[in-house]
Amino acid sequence: MSTTDNSILGLKMPTDPRWVDLASISLEEILTDHAFCEQKAATQCISLIQRYPEKIELVNALSPIVTEEWGHFRMVWAEMKKRGFELGHQRRDDYVNLLLQREPKGISSEEKLLHKLMICALIEARSCERFRLLSEGLEEEALRKFYYKFMVSEAGHYRMFIDLAEKYFGEEKTRAAWKRWLETEAEVLQLLAPRGDRMH
């Protein structure tokens, strides 16, 4: 079984199948959004390192991810330039914003870390699923191969965030938090119409 199947990732709701068709006819838009998603992923890892510098395993794990995510941005930007596309402006990510709005309030910095790691894992898992759909559903072979590479990378990142949570909070607590966040993510997706100009 592929490590990117929803059953392995744990995602409760598959992406609307219309999304790939919409993305394929909005290629410049989807690549622009993808580019900014990679930037934001790098920034989020930097933020976690800055906020929790005493957690050596976290710093060691996330430091190379910062470089990798920025490298991904450069890959997407190179693909866009090759096609004569412009980068455009960063767009609001309603999916991520809705997840962030559902973070528990009034908890300790330590507890916040668990939920930050869960949200990061969710975003990586959903991105992995979307990259798989693009790698299978786009007509152009070069783009299918392009997105297959991203799919494999995101699967590893998703697992890394889960592993970090288990390291600091234990398997049982992490499993319970992951289950709650998976249910929350499914609720968030139901609020969002499929858009071909957004990765999420």
Image (cartoon, helix red, strand yellow):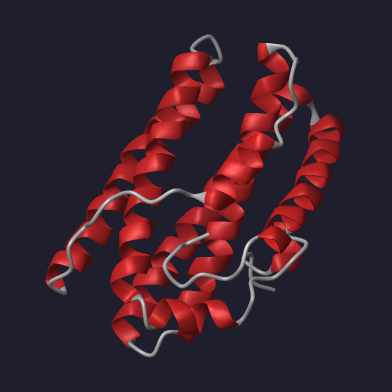
Name the residue at 78% across, 62% down: 12
Asked if 81 appears above or below 25 in the picture, the reply is above
Point out residue 109 in the picture as x, y percentages from the top left corner: 66, 13
How far across and how far down the image is residue 108, in percent? 72, 11
- In the image, residue 87 lies at what x, y percent? 21, 57
Disc count in the image?
0
Of residue 3 and residue 97, the one placed in the foreground of this image is: 97
Q: Is residue 158 above or below residue 142?
A: above
Q: Quadrant of residue 160?
A: top right
**Does residue 193 appear left or right of residue 181 in this picture?**
left
Q: Is residue 65 among the parts visible in the rendering?
A: yes
Q: Decide which of 200, 1 is in the foreground and name it.
A: 200
Q: Residue 3 in the image: x percent, y percent?
A: 64, 65
| Residue at 43%, 41% in the rendered image | 41
Q: Describe residue 82's horizontal placement relative to residue 70 as left or right.
A: left
Q: Residue at x 38, y 58 (%)?
A: 34
- Decide if residue 70 is on the left or right side of residue 127: left
Location of residue 16 with respect to 38 vertically, above or below: below
Return the residue found at the far bottom.
139
Give the residue at x 44% y 16%: 50
Q: Quadrant of the N terminus?
A: bottom right
The reply to whether residue 136 is visible in this rendering is no
| Closer to us: 8 or 196 | 196
